[in-house]
Image (cartoon, grey):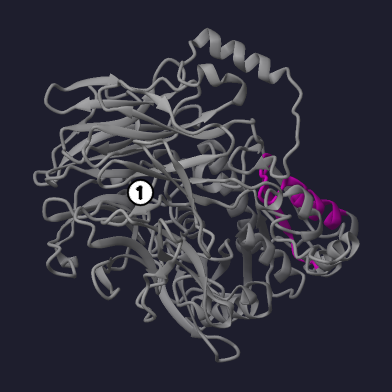
Amino acid sequence: MKKLLEYEDLRKMEYLSAPSASPDGRQAAYVVQKADRTGRFVPRIFLIDTESGEISPLFEDSAQEADAPAFSPDGQKLAYLRKGKTENQIWVYDRESRKHKKVTSARHGVEEFTWSADSRKLAFTAPCFSGERLNWLREMTEREKGQWTDERDHSPVVIENLLYKLDDTYGVRDGSVRQIGIVCAGGSGQQILTDGRMDCYKPAFSRDGRFLAYYGRPYAHVKELTAEIFVRDLKSGEVSMIKGEREADDTNPVIFAADGQSVIFAAYEKGKNGGFSLQLFRRGRKDGREICLFPEEEICHGVDSLPLGRTAYGRESAAYQINADGQYIYFRSGWMGCENLYRLSLAGEAVVEPVLEDEMSVHSFCVPMGGKIVYTRGDLLTPAELYAVPYEEAGVRADREAQRRLTVSNSWLEEFELSLPEELWVDSYDKKARIHGFVMKPSAYEEGMKYPAVLDVHGGPSGFYAHDFWFEFQMIAARGMAVVYCDPRGSFGYGMEFASGSYCWGQESMDDLFAFMDGAAELGFIDAEWTGVTGGSYGGHMTNRIIGTTDRFKAAVTQRTLANLATSYGTGDMGFIWSENGMQSELENLLSRAEKSPIGKIDRMKTPLLILHGEKDYRCSLEQGEQMFIAMKDRNPEVPVRFVVFPGENHGITRHGKVHFQIAHLRELTEWFVRFLVEKEDWKGEKA
């Protein structure tokens, strides 16, 4: 008999990420991360023979930390990030001599890098401070770093820019500005190319190595996050901004087209009914003229449809990548609950073709190398592992039956009784859409029994629940409850019209959740009288809305909640960006936002409520959770309410928080539902 999962089992999880394939396809490098005793995830690089499956650590000392491996285009070297004296620097491993060499000395380390096509140079991004210009490329000693840190910690914070805090920086930004640097693969010629006046990041070489493209943020005030594309002539030093009609999405690097005369980038494109998707565009370097590369037919939802519900950690590859001869762009995209691989032809008429489709969720991939594609993928019962599949570019589809799993990183899961999520489609209440999702039986399910169930609402509000493994759902199932999760209208992965933002904040999304819950109950094993609801971020917002609308749920957990759009305007890192201030007075703006906020329905919230929030959450700031707690205690003192704050954690606590806080978060959530759904606590005293 197999065991049931326990909370502490999360510590055993190993996370695979950042695959890189050698040009001949015979070897791949990848990263494995596992939490240490402090709760920090430790990255280590491994090499694998893609034919024999033989695995070896990159370093003789297998405990050596390193991240972001990348083979040089000629296959002779492997670059990676590893700590130098005090910060992460670029190191280069020569495959023939087997020697490692540090090639950068950035004062505050290197964040990312890329190879030139001739394998002679690397471009990188490094955080720099304007007052340290003369020392940007002089790495600090441990003593100097300690003095620098002490001085910073004893200095006041001066704020002059509107965008002074970010969730990614766990609060107030430190004043650094990302800059672009370049260095020869042997370590000579290291220099910072940009002038420090604006954030510059995600560099990419042209095929001939003469030009370097990157994103820059030249604007201030509310447009400070707006990225423009810049191109630098590495021979003359001339820099030009390649401006066009659309605002580039800076999540992935710019790509030079094969001829070097245009750049390819991603931008959100609106479609029918206000729907949208991330699509690829070609922009001329000289005239800024833009062409959408995506055809109108939909066999996928743009590029990178934001898959959710994945137990993952670490760096992911770019969502779209150009192949060796510049004829195709390979990309991952969501469709009907799966995250598949596709390619877009650049020669002649633009055509999107499926490359690898399966009941899976692709995390990272490498463009075809040596007759195969190397990638990481997860499925409903398996966290992401490394795979390879034979593939010749003269064809189109890879044979999904030929996929070969190269790693088995979490074999310990085989000892446990896991719940296989079952797909379900239901009609929306208004019959205008079909809603897709999954239903999980309790891990120890017995035929003929009925069980309490938890409805989980995803965040975003864009994104979608993928065919992937999510430890949280398995843990809830292990504690004797069914799990129900779906993609209401407004989600990605079902076409542009389905993804309309108006659905997310209107009635449709809530009705879709209810319709799906009804459909799940009709399967016969859910006790519809004993259900709960939870969600994080937008899902927390929806949880608040739901319990302010109906009493059908016996318990609720709101995570990373958005409760009051009026106060989020000034406390969240993006609140003012979502503002529809326009010509409204400030009072009208705040009143308009308050009217749309679930905090206004607090008097109707009679459902036992658990509030989970990271102390350093600056997306949906901590005060959002505080407002819910205070209002519930003040207005509904008879209703059980509990507020749990996780020190030092930001909006991503359930994905990349310290492992002990992830476990505590999961325990709080699950045991709240056990208390009110499984044990059926009589908090109203109705059985007295």
Residue 397, above or below 313: below
Nearest the eye: 264 or 375: 264
Nearest the eye: 645 or 598: 598
Q: Residue 405, how many percent across, how many down?
A: 20, 53
Nearest the eye: 365 or 583: 583
Residue at image x 89%, y 63%? 585
Would you say 289 lies left or right of 568 here?
A: left
Q: Can residue 445 be seen in this view?
A: no
Would you say 300 lies left or right of 227 here?
A: left
Q: Can residue 427 be seen in this view?
A: yes
Q: Residue 568, how many percent across, how many down?
A: 76, 54
Nearest the eye: 136 or 339: 136
Residue at image x 63%, y 65%? 533
Q: How packed is label 1: few (under 14 Cα within 10 Å), some, or many (20 or more)?
A: some
Q: Where on the picture, by quarter, is residue 23?
A: top left
Q: Give the range drawn in magenta.
A: 605-633
Is residue 621 within the magenta segment?
yes
SS category of the residue bearing label 1: loop
Total marks in image: 1
Q: Residue 381, how many percent across, how many down?
A: 34, 59
Residue 237, above or below 50: above
Residue at image x 75%, y 65%? 580
Is residue 21 within the magenta segment?
no
Residue 540, above or below 301: above
| Tag 1: amino acid | Ser
Q: Where on the picture, by quarter, is residue 26?
A: top left
Residue at image x 31%, y 49%? 415
Residue placed furthest toward the top:
143
Image quarter (top left, top right, bottom left or bottom right) of the C terminus: bottom right
Q: Residue 611, how many percent across, how many down?
A: 71, 52
Mark 1, residue position: 317
Image quarter (top left, top right, bottom left or bottom right) of the N terminus: bottom left
